Amino acid sequence: MTVLILTCEEDVTADMVVVHLNGSGVPVVRLDPADLTGGVSLSGEFVHGRFRGHLSVGGRLVSINGLRSVWVRRPGTPAGRAARPSAWLTEEASQALYGMLRGCDARWMNHPDMARQARHKPWQLRLAQRCGLPVPATVITTFPRAAREFAERFPDLVVKPVSGAHPQDPPRAVPTSRVAPDTDFSAVAFGPTLLQRRIAKRADIRLTVVGKRLLAARKATAPDADPAEVDVRFAAPGAPWEPVEVPPRTADAVRAYMRRAELAYGAFDFAEDADGTWWFLECNQSGQFGFVEVETGQPIARAIAEWLARPVPVSPPEVSEATGTLR
Amino acid sequence: MQPFALNYARPVAELAVATPYVYDSGMQLNVLVDGRIAACDHALLREVGTTTSTAGSKTHFDD
């Protein structure tokens, strides 16, 4: 049984997992859906009540029914590198590839439907609340007046993108940024705006969840850190990431989140305040983990490899279309 | 007419160094010029920053 990894070639973080799978003798096929109709080929037939499908890349041929797991890491847009790419071809390639994969019994990290749902930050915030995780006061609005009133109640605010996406024309990044108390909120009318009470943090927490395993790392905020730098991705390097224990109540809430979200992998970001409370910021369903492993030595890649390598669950017998008999 | 959040946008910081490895389709891994597996060189990964959570990249929608 083979592990299928959907990711781009330059994804060296995926390599960290491939190394472990190779070491344990688990067959791996790695491909980028962007290479469909070029370096990647597929075929599947539905005949006599049965399905047989195959994927081919780089001289490797794998049966779709022979997959034990599918890891959706950093896949490109299906057929994005085809000789004549188009939105129509992308949809055709996407439906063919993911449609056939959805029909197999392999375990997903993460299933595309669950991944799509889990990317919605407002949904994340609500699920975190329901699971008992502390969530900073947040408003998402297109009403300038609502933003002004929220700022009066919570004068120390940050703004961040609702989607987590960044504008590409031209390429820009929108880091989580502090909002000055006297800010003019009239531009809130031109796009949904997410404002959140700033947590005066003493550390950032990255909690990586692989199946039932929780691996948390903590990066202390320097006492002399610039208070304007609230986004750890843009701050000066500062203290290293270090392993940290997960408080039991947080662990229970995070496991509930993963269960309700039907995710096999998630990278949670928390801000730790002066009281030691971990405030939920977001859960990235495909968040980076390599930088944490490199700094802390936590065996995240190994945990992912072990999850992917588990045997496929036994499925109920199929009923033959022609005879009605059990197979 | 610019959305409020874009008042806080900044240019994307590009990687200053080119990645010193290339994909080997036979191994299904990125390898260095001397044939070593890039993912096994944690000092290198730390230096080039390609496993790091970033923002603004097309390929890092989920950080």
Image: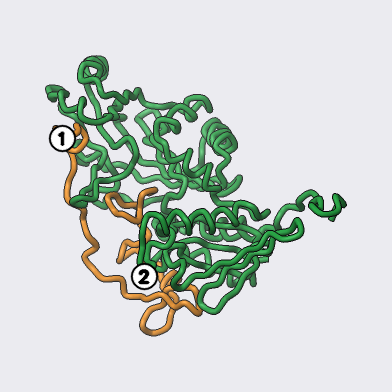
Chain colours: A green, B orange
- The residue shown at (36%, 41%) is A204
Q: Is residue A249 above or below residue A152?
A: below
Left or right of A122: which side holds A236?
left
Residue depicted at 44% across the width and 78% down the height: B24
Pointer 2 indicates a residue of which chain?
Answer: A
| Viewer-nearest residue: A41 or B6 | A41
Q: Is residue A218 left or right of residue A178?
A: right
* Quarter of image, res A120: top left
Residue occupying the point 58% across, 60% down? A305
Question: Which numbered disc covers residue A83?
Answer: 2
Q: Is residue A177 left or right of residue A320?
A: left
The residue closer to the viewer here, A71 or A227, is A71
Q: Marks 2 and 1: same chain?
A: no
User: What residue is disc 1 on?
Assistant: B2
Q: Amino acid at mark 2?
A: Ala
Q: What label sits on residue A214 in the rendered view?
A: none
* Mark pair 2, 1: CA separation: 36 Å
Q: Nearer the viewer, residue A292 or A103?
A: A103
Counting from the top left corner in percent of width and height, residue A247 is at 52, 35
Question: Is B21 placed left or right of A107 in the picture?
Answer: left
A162 in relation to A314, above or below: above
Image quadrant occupied by the N terminus of chain A: bottom right
What type is the residue that disc 1 sits on?
Gln
Q: Tell me the residue at 49%/44% (across/down).
A: A115
Asked if one can make out residue A276 in the rendered structure from this viewpoint, the answer is: no
Tell me the SS state at disc 1.
Answer: loop
Q: Residues within 10 Å of mark 2 (few under 14, many from 20)?
A: few
What SS does tag 2 mark? loop
The chain under label 1 reads B
Q: Is residue B10 above or below residue A197?
A: below
